[in-house]
Image: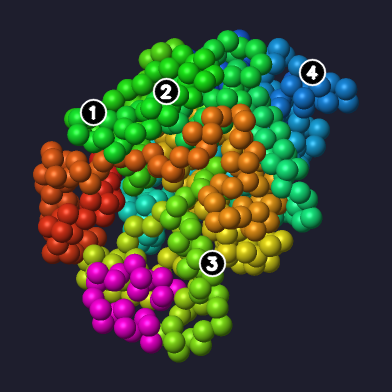
């Protein structure tokens, strides 16, 4: 796990890459790689690659980056892990013709795999990665993001060059990179708590979507291609017994966890006591390697509803003989962390879970662990959220052959009922306009609420825009490719393309790397995802039981007490803290923001604060703090 950076100057430009230019960008990401730093710049200054190293696999100096192949025709800088690198290396050694200089570096495997198979080598990689590869013979730069989007990769094209990096703050060190808000991205941020790829909140800076590569030639020609979509790799499990499906899920998870134990530094597990993290802990504890170290977060004081999972985490830790560590947070921990949170995020990730993710990562790092396995992805793949029960039912109701007139009359009725019916109005509005009811597992402001809270200028600018526009390409792929066009499959697929890569996985990446810790995600191993998306909806939702087939898979592996208990999310008492110190700080920050900008309607913002809309104020506070630190 590392931080990568680089630039390619197009051949009609006179700009030249220098060591000071590249090192200034690279070293903004010291936290991503405290163990070393490297760079390579072509003699003519046209191409430069930089790297900050967090040593995890092959700790030798020979494995340092940027790295080239034996004849210097390929150069790579890479962030992430190729978990099956030993298997691929063995295949390449059997083929022959490759000269190796490291003992077991996965970075070197990328170089020789590209030599052997070209860009199709990506289909052999099992891992998480953001890769930049310069081909000196073809004069092409390849930028590649892993299938799911676990690792971020940002880029900007300006002033006759393309720059790229693991973090936006590195790109901002380019003296010619402008700092301005992308207002359309802000509009979508208000819906999704994050900006959907390829946009970022910075005008002119983009992020590469998961499962895509970008090929850039030295004369500035750019091609983006989606090399992986889950629907191209599913095998419908129709007519396969539940028992067999459950066995296959557990076998694939066991492989995914085993692969993610591969490391030359200590590895642990984030443990909440839920099914997902408990499964990670149980599978991790199998085989050799000694007792697993687990890390858990709770809250001090009167916030007992947010501490209930500590008991379950302790139970699971005892079950597997783990070395258990926990940390209890206070409101002061949140307030003290806010400036650092904004700095690490680069652009707002308006999920308050960023706070406990940072502190549990710090807890692990303080106890000597460099890598941790996390449980993201299981709820989306196996129907795990209680709210999805309701949303799935609404999707089914929406599909019933009611005349559109009935839906529109209901829409009118809710509109007349007032703003308290905002969510129901929005869902019915979608149904009345032939859109899916479900847009994302995390939604903030409805379309009507956005129009109310925006400044008059933006209200007019976006009067005819909805955030459905950003989802249309995803829906079109779903309609053309999905083997089972079920409502649940749509819900999972859209979250695989938006909420997971740009919200949930970014909170893991940004917060864990903020303390120089690598997060690994077994449930989002692409083989696990492909298997999960091959399971019919009827099996996933059998008996109206959340995670029905996953529970069947892990029963006997983890205690029944953890499997059968009520689902509890990884909560943060933001609403409660709003009535404490956080509320006053939020009022001051938002008032200051509204006084200096023209993004929001100040009266509407004050109304939300007065009504104690805890979630909504957090989304706006994140944006205001980001603007203050990165734009103003």
User: Which residue in the structure is indicated by mark 4?
Assistant: 99
Q: Name the residue located 54 percent from the left edge and 19 percent from the top edge.
A: 320
Q: Residue 621 vs residue 129: left or right?
A: left
551 or 238: nearer the viewer: 551
Local crowd size for mark 2, using a 10 Å CA cut-off: few (<14), some (14–19), many (≥20): many
Image point (71%, 33%), residue name: 251
From the image, give the main secondary structure of the stretch colored magenta: helix
Percent x, y of residue 32 = 45, 25
Q: Earlier in the sequence, mark 4 or mark 1?
A: 4
User: Does 471 sit left or right of 540 as displayed?
Assistant: left
Mark 3–mark 4 CB contact (< 8 Å): no
Q: Which mark is residue 300?
A: 1
Mark 4 residue crowding within 10 angstroms, few (<14) / some (14–19) / many (20+): few
Q: Dots 4 and 1: beta carbons under 8 Å? A: no
Q: Which callout, 2 or 3, points at the residue further toward the start of the chain?
A: 2
- Residue drawn at 75 percent across, 36 percent down: 124
**Among the two numbered marks 1 and 3 on one chain, the one whose residue lies closer to the N terminus:** 1
Question: What residue is shown with label 2?
Answer: 314
């Amino acid at each position: 796990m590392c931080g990568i950076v680089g630039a390619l100057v197009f051949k009609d430009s006179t700009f030249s890459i220098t060591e000071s230019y590249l090192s200034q960008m690279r070293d903004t990401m010291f936290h991503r790689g405290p163990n070393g730093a490297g760079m390579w710049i072509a003699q003519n200054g046209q191409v430069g690659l930089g790297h900050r190293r967090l040593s995890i696999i092959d700790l030798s100096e020979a494995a340092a980056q940027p790295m080239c192949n034996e004849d210097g025709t390929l150069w790579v800088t890479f962030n992430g892990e190729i978990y099956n690198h030993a298997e691929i290396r063995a295949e390449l050694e059997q083929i022959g013709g490759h000269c190796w200089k490291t003992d077991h570096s996965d970075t070197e495997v990328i170089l020789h795999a590209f030599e052997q198979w070209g860009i199709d080598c990506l289909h052999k990689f099992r891992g998480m990665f953001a890769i930049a590869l310069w081909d000196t013979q073809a004069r092409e730069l390849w930028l590649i993001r892993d299938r799911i989007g676990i690792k971020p990769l940002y880029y900007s094209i300006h002033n006759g060059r393309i720059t790229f990096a693991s973090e936006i703050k590195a790109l901002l060190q380019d003296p010619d990179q402008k700092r301005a808000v992308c207002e359309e991205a802000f509009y979508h941020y208000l819906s999704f708590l994050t900006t959907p790829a390829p946009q970022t909140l910075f005008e002119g800076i983009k992020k590469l979507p998961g499962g895509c590569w970008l090929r850039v030639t030295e004369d500035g020609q750019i091609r983006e291609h989606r090399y992986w979509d889950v629907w191209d790799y599913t095998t419908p499990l129709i007519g396969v017994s539940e028992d067999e499906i459950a066995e296959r899920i557990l076998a694939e998870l066991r492989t995914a966890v085993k692969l993610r134990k591969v490391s030359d530094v200590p590895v642990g597990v984030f443990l909440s006591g839920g099914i997902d993290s408990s499964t990670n802990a149980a599978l991790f504890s199998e085989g050799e390697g000694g007792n697993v170290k687990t890390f858990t977060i709770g809250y001090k004081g009167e916030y007992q509803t947010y501490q209930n999972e500590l008991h379950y985490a302790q139970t699971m830790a005892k079950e597997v003989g783990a070395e258990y560590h926990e940390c209890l947070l206070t409101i002061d921990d949140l307030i003290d962390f806010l400036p650092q949170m904004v700095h690490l995020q680069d652009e707002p990730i308006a999920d308050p879970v960023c706070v406990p993710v940072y502190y549990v990562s710090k807890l692990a790092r303080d106890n000597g662990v460099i890598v941790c396995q996390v449980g993201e992805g299981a709820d989306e793949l196996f129907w795990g959220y209680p709210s999805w029960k309701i949303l799935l039912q609404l999707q089914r109701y929406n599909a019933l052959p009611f005349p559109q007139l009935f839906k529109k009359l209901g829409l009118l009725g809710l509109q007349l009922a007032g703003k308290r019916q905002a969510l129901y109005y929005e869902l019915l509005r979608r149904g009345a306009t032939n859109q899916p009811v479900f847009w994302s597992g995390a939604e903030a402001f409805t379309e009507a609420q956005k129009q109310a809270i925006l400044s008059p200028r933006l209200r007019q600018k976006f009067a005819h825009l909805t955030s459905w526009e950003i989802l249309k390409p995803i829906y079109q792929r779903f309609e053309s490719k999905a083997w089972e066009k079920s409502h649940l499959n749509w819900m999972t697929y859209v979250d695989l393309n938006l909420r997971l890569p740009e919200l949930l996985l970014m909170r893991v990446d940004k917060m864990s790397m903020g303390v120089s810790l690598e997060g690994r995600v077994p449930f989002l191993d692409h083989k696990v995802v492909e298997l999960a998306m091959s399971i019919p909806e009827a099996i996933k939702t059998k008996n109206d039981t959340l995670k029905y087939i996953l529970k069947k898979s892990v029963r006997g592996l983890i205690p029944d007490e953890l499997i059968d208990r009520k689902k509890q999310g990884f909560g943060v008492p933001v609403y409660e803290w709003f009535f404490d110190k956080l509320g006053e700080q939020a009022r001051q920050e938002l008032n200051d923001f509204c006084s200096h900008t023209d993004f929001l309607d100040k009266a509407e913002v004050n109304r939300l604060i007065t009504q104690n809309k805890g979630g909504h104020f957090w989304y706006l506070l994140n944006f205001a703090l980001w603007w203050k630190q990165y734009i103003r």
